[in-house]
Image: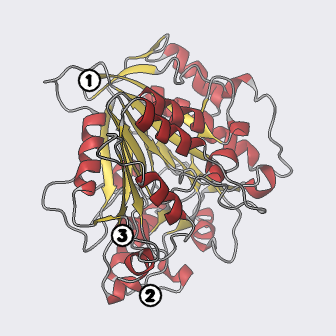
Amino acid sequence: MLATALLFHMFILPFRGPTSAGKAAAAGPYLGNRCNDPCRSVLVESIPEGLTYDDNHPQPFHLRRLEDPPGRRQPQCGHRLFLLDPEQRGHSHQDPSAGQGEEILAALREPGRGVTLRIAVNPPSSRMPCSDLQLLEESGAQIRKVNFPQLTGGVLHTKFWIVDQQHIFLGSANMDWRALTQVKELGMAVYNCSCLAQDLGKMFEAYWALGLPNATIPSPWPANYSTSYNKETPLELELNGTEAGVYFSSAPPALCATGRTEDLQSLVSIVDDADEFVYIEVMSYLPTMEFSHPKRFWPVIDDHLRKAAYERRVRVRLLVGCWRHSKANMFPFLRSLAAMHDVRTHYSMEVRLFVVPANETQARIPYARVNHSKFMVTDKVAYIGTSNWSGDYFLHTAGSALVVNQSHVGAGEQPTVRDRLQAVFERDWNSRYSQELSLPGQWEQLCGTY
C-alpha cells in the first residue's frame, strides 16, 4: 500500500536562507500573524501490509505527490536517515514491499528535472549507512551531515519535507523503504501554504548551518532564524476553508531561536489546556532519560498526564507501540499509569498496546512491523510530532512538531484536522490490533512474537 511521504532523519531544501524567505514573506501573503494563502491539508498514513481496518482510513500518500507539484520543484527535507535501497541492510531487492522505496530513490535521482535538493542528515554509521545519500550526491543533491551527538548529545530525529517553499510534510516516517509498507506511520501534508513552508524553512536552515565543519550552536541564534509564530501567537490561516491557529515547535531547547516554542513546552501545555480528553498514540513512552548513564527518572510528561486525570477529570488514553524492540522497563511505568483508572474515583486513565501483525516473511524484516506514529489529539488541539516520548528526545534530540488549534470551530462545520486525527486514534484504539496492557511478563509474548 502506498504511504506517507518518506522521511528519514534528513532535510532537503532549496537554496534560500531565512533572510530571503523573510523578505519574500513581507511582500507576500502575510498581514501580521495572518496568512492569506489557500492552505490545503491532509492527514496521511502508511498502513503496513496485512494490517486492515473495517472502516475507511486517511488516504495513503506517496512522496511523488510532494516531489512533483507544479512549478520549480525544489524540495527540502529533514530526516534522521536515508534508507530507500533495501540492500543497504541486507534485505533482498526481491521483497515486493521494497519497490516503493526504490521508486522514490529513482525519482529523486532522475536527471534533467531542474530540482535543487538539499539534505541534512546524521553522520553515517555501520547501523545507518549512507549509500543512498552517495547516489543522490552523485546526482547533484547537496548533503550536510550534522554531528548532533557532539552538538547536543542526541541525534537528528526530525522528519519533514519542504517543496518550493509552498508545500510541506511533517510526520513520523523515516526516509526508509520500510516506512512505506512495513511500518505504521502518520503525518500531515500541507499544500499551497508558503507562510508555513517559509517558517519551517527557518528550522531547516538551522540544521543546515550546523552541518558546516566545526559548527557550534549559536546563543542566541541570529535574528533571521526567529519566528513570531508560537503557542502564544500562532499563525492564523484557513486549512481547507476552516479557520485554524498553527505553529511549529522544536527540540531541543538549544535549537530554538527567539519566538520558537520548545517542543516539550508545547506538548505539556496542550495536555494542561485539555478540558475533556487527551488521546496519545506513540511508539515509545518512558518517564525516564532513556539513553542516559547513569539512569535518570524524568516524570515531566507523566506528571502532567496524571494531573489532568486527577485534578480536572480529563479522560486520558495512551496507545503505545508494542514490538520486539520495546524496552522492558517501559511496561512497569505503563502499568503504573493504568492503575489510576478506577470506577469509584472516576479517574479515567487507560493504557493499551498496539501490535502490528506479521507473517513469517514480514517478521524477518529488521526494524519493521510497529506502530511508529507520534501524535496527540485533545478536545481542542491536534499535535503531530517526530519524537518518542522520553526525556532524551525533548532535551537532546533534534525533533519537531506541527500544532493545529481549531477549538473555536463550531459543530456542524466541515471536519477539522483535529476531528480527523481524533477519528484516526479512535479507529486504532477500537481496532483488533489494540491490546489490553498485559500482566507482568506477558508483554514479552505479546510484543516479541508474531
- The answer to which of marks 3 and 1 sits earlier in the sequence is 3
364 vs 160: above or below: below
- Residue bearing mark 3: 100
Which residue is depicted at the point 72% across and 54% down? 146
Residue placed most toward the observer, 187 or 167? 187
Q: Is residue 285 visible?
A: yes
Residue 157 rendering spot, x and y as whole percentages: 59, 54
Q: Name the residue under label 2.
A: 92
Q: What residue type is labelled 1?
A: Thr
Few, some or many C-alpha atoms within 10 Å of disc 3 (few <14, some 14-19, many ≥20)? Answer: many
Corner quadrant of residue 16: top right
Q: Is residue 308 above or below residue 181?
A: above
Give the camera-side residue of 89 and 367: 367
Q: As rendered, which of 44 and 136 lies closer to the eye? A: 44
User: Which corner quadrant holds the C terminus?
Assistant: bottom left
Q: Residue tagged by mark 1?
A: 242
